[in-house]
Amino acid sequence: MTELRPAPAPAPAPTPDRHGYQVDVVWTGNTGQGTSSYRGYERTHEVRVPGREAIEASADPAFLGDANRYNPEELLVAALSQCHMLWYLHLAAETGVVVIGYHDQARGVLAESPVDGTGQFEEVVLAPQVTVSDRVSLDTAEALHQRAHELCYIARSVTFPVRREPTTRIAN
């Protein structure tokens, strides 16, 4: 017999000061026996946002996941990188810094406890390589990373350090 539970209450209505986000995570890894054993199911799932294509995801391969899919740890590092970049570009536009290239090779370290398998991120390092149009804006461009970090919603929400190791170069 299947027990039906009521759908969760909707998030509070967005206001100018509050923004709601809904993401559906749907497990697709039932191989026919459900979770009858720890190794008997796949960790595959989809991350869906209404009106968009699904992101195919899984657990990290270290946790029996599919290496061909995104995992939650990668998506957290990506979210931090995206948030920093978007604030950085916003600040650049406001201050007259013309950014013509931005590439971040962000990385994170998750420490897993050998005792019980729990863990947490120790840090995430953002390593944006920024290209600006002229030498005049070089110092300002470098200083904007600190302010972008201070404004990033996601960096402000995590309890581990988010370090920045930016490089800035002038376009040829």
Image (cartoon, grey):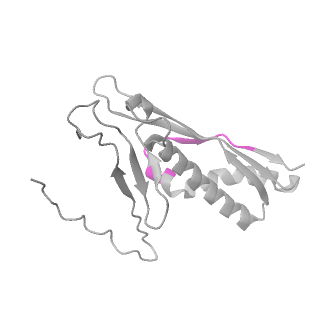
Q: Is residue 68 above or below residue 23?
A: above
Residue 35 placement (x, y as % from top left): 23, 38
Which residue reaches farthest right?
Answer: 172
Hey, which quadrant is residue 41 in on the image? Answer: top left
Q: Can the viewer see residue 160 in this picture? A: no
Residue at 29%, 43% (x, y): give it. Answer: 30
Q: Of residues 108 and 122, which is closer to you in this image?
A: 108
Within the magenta stretch, is there residue 166? yes
Q: Is residue 126 left or right of residue 17?
A: right
Residue at 46%, 48% (x, y): give it. Answer: 56
Residue at 73%, 49% (x, y): give it. Answer: 142
Residue 76 placement (x, y as % from top left): 48, 46
Residue 109 placement (x, y as % from top left): 49, 33
Q: Of residues 71 and 45, which is closer to you in this image?
A: 45
- The magenta region covers 155-167
Which residue reaches farthest top?
Answer: 114
Q: Can the viewer see residue 127 in this picture? A: yes
Q: In this view, does 51 lie above or below 164?
A: below
Q: In this view, does 109 lie above or below 140?
A: above
Which residue reaches farthest front?
Answer: 32
The mark total stands at 0
Hey, which quadrant is residue 92 in on the image? Answer: bottom right
Residue 151 placement (x, y as % from top left): 56, 58
